[in-house]
Image (spheres, helix red, strand yellow):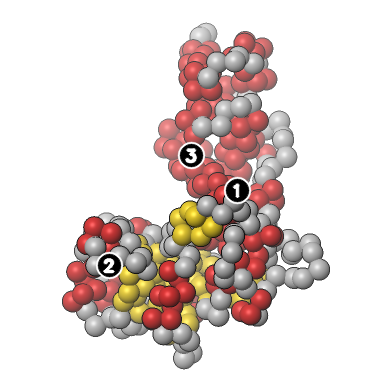
C-alpha cells in the first residue's frame, strides 16, 4: 500500500541558510545530491521543533479514488481526537467564499476584512475540514479540472485542540509581523512552498518565534516539489515567543525567494534543453544552483541576469568567466542587465561559429 511504501524521516532541526550553499566546483553537474540541512542547533538549548517528513505522496486522481485523502495522510490528518483545519488562499481557489458560505464547514477569514469582498477574495481562510466532505477530496485531487486543487498549492493543514475562533485569533497576529527593524511586513505563511522552506531553514535566532507560531498545533505542509508533506510539532509550546520583532526575517524570506526562483529556473532550463531531464533531479537542481550562485558572485544578482548567465554556461559547457573572450564583459562596469544580455548573445554567437 502507499502507506507501507512511504518513508517517514524525523529530525529536530533549526537550520541556517548557509547550509544550503554549495562550494565552488569546476563542473556544476558533479555536485551530486543536495546535502540534507538537518544540523541540530549549535547552542546550549536544542530546538523544540520536530519535523517529520512523509515521503512519496501521490495525490488522488479525479473520479478514481474512493478515499478523501491519500492513504498515507489519512492518519496524520484525521487520526486521533484533534480537529483538522486548512488555511487556504482564496486567490487560488475559484469561488472559495461562495462555496464556504453554502457549506456546513466552519470557516473564518484570517484577515480583519470587515466584510470587504475585494479583500476577502484574496485572503487566507481558516476552514475546519470534514474527512467525508467532497471539498476535502478536491483539496487532495490532481487533475486538469478547475475544481481539483492539489496542483494549485492552495495552502496547508493543521491539527489542533483549539477551536476555530481561538485559531483565527492566533493566526491573525502573524499576517503582518515586525522585522528586526520594527517595520511590519507580510508573512505569507499560507503559501505552502514558503512555509515548508521556512520551517526547515529559518535562522537559529528566530527559533523561539517559529515555535510560538506553530504553538500547540501540528502543521502538515505539502511540499509538491519533493512529493512529500512536512509535519511540524513543538514539543514544549511554552518555549515559543508570540510577540516582538522577528529575528532574521528579511534575510530568511529573501533566501526562500531565491530558492523558489531556482526551482522555476530549473523548470525553464529543462523546457529549453529537454536532454537535461535525463539527469537525476537532485543532480540537475544542484547544478542549476551552483551556476546561479556563480552568477551572483560575479555581480549578476537579478533573476533575469542569473537566468541569462545559466543559459550561457549551458551553451558554452563552462562558466563564461573561464573564457578569455568574455573577460571584457565579466569585468565591465555596465549595468548587470546589459552585461548579462551581452554575455548570452556572445555565447550564442560562439556556439554558432564554426
CA neighbours of label 2 inside 10 A, class few (<14), some (14 to 19), many (20+): few
If you read the primary sequence from the N terminus, does the residue marked by circle 3 or circle 2 appear first? 2
Q: Could you tell me which secondary element the residue under label 1 belongs to?
A: helix
The residue pinned by badge 2 equals 114
The residue pinned by badge 1 equals 251
- Image depth: mark 3 or mark 1 in front: 1
If you read the primary sequence from the N terminus, does the residue marked by circle 2 or circle 1 appear first? 2
- Image depth: mark 3 or mark 2 in front: 2
Residue at 57% over, 22% down? 316
**Residue nearest the observer in this picture, 182 or 265:** 182
- Position above or below: 62 against 37: below
- Image depth: mark 2 or mark 1 in front: 2
Q: Residue furthest top?
A: 354
If you read the primary sequence from the N terminus, does the residue marked by circle 3 or circle 1 appear first? 1
| Alpha carbon distance from label 3 to label 1 | 21 Å
Residue at 68% over, 54% down? 16
Q: Does the CB distance between marks 3 and 2 fall below 8 Å?
A: no
The residue pinned by badge 3 equals 265
Q: Which label is found at residue 166? A: none
Q: Could you tell me which secondary element the residue under label 3 belongs to?
A: helix
**Residue nearest the observer in this picture, 186 or 236:** 186
CA neighbours of label 3 inside 10 A, class few (<14), some (14 to 19), many (20+): many
- Position above or below: 137 against 325: below
| Alpha carbon distance from label 3 to label 2 | 39 Å
Q: Position of residue 265 (x, y in %)?
A: 48, 39
- Position above or below: 306 against 86: above
Q: Residue furthest bottom?
A: 81
Please give left or right for residue 45 compared with residue 76 in the image.
right
Residue at 61% over, 79% down? 237
Amino acid at each position: 500500500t502507499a502507506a507501507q511504501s512511504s518513508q517517514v524521516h524525523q529530525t529536530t532541526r533549526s537550520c541556517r541558510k548557509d547550509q544550503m550553499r554549495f562550494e565552488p566546483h569546476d563542473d556544476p553537474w558533479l555536485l551530486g545530491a543536495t546535502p540534507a540541512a538537518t544540523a541540530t542547533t549549535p547552542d546550549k538549548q536544542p530546538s523544540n521543533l520536530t519535523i517529520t517528513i512523509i515521503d512519496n505522496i501521490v495525490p488522488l486522481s479525479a473520479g478514481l479514488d474512493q478515499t478523501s485523502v491519500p492513504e498515507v495522510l489519512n492518519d496524520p490528518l484525521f487520526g486521533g481526537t484533534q480537529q483538522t483545519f486548512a488555511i487556504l488562499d482564496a486567490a487560488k481557489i475559484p469561488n472559495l467564499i461562495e462555496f464556504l458560505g453554502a457549506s456546513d464547514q466552519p470557516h473564518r477569514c484570517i484577515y480583519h476584512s470587515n466584510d470587504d469582498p475585494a479583500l476577502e477574495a484574496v485572503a487566507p481562510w481558516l476552514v475546519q475540514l470534514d474527512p467525508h466532505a467532497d471539498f476535502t477530496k478536491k483539496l487532495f485531487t490532481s487533475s486538469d479540472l478547475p475544481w481539483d486543487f492539489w496542483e494549485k498549492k492552495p495552502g496547508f493543514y493543521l491539527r489542533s485542540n483549539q477551536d476555530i475562533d481561538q485559531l483565527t485569533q492566533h493566526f491573525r497576529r502573524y499576517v503582518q509581523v515586525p522585522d528586526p527593524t520594527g517595520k511590519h511586513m507580510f508573512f505569507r505563511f499560507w503559501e505552502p512552498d514558503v512555509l515548508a522552506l521556512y520551517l526547515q531553514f529559518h535562522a537559529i535566532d528566530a527559533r523561539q518565534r517559529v515555535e510560538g507560531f506553530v504553538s500547540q498545533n501540528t502543521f502538515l505542509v505539502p511540499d509538491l516539489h519533493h512529493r512529500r508533506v512536512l509535519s511540524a510539532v513543538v514539543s514544549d509550546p511554552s518555549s515559543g515567543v508570540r510577540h516582538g520583532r522577528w529575528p532574521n526575517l528579511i534575510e530568511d524570506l529573501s533566501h526562500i525567494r531565491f530558492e523558489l526562483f531556482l526551482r522555476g529556473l530549473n523548470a525553464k532550463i529543462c523546457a529549453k534543453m529537454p536532454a537535461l531531464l535525463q539527469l537525476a533531479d537532485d543532480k540537475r537542481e544542484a547544478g542549476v544552483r551552483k551556476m546561479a550562485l556563480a552568477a551572483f558572485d560575479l555581480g549578476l544578482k537579478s533573476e533575469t541576469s542569473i537566468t541569462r548567465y545559466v543559459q550561457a554556461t549551458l551553451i558554452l559547457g563552462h562558466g563564461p568567466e573561464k573564457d578569455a573572450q568574455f573577460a571584457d564583459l565579466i569585468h565591465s562596469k555596465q549595468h548587470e542587465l546589459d552585461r548579462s544580455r551581452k554575455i548570452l548573445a556572445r555565447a550564442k554567437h560562439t556556439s554558432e561559429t564554426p
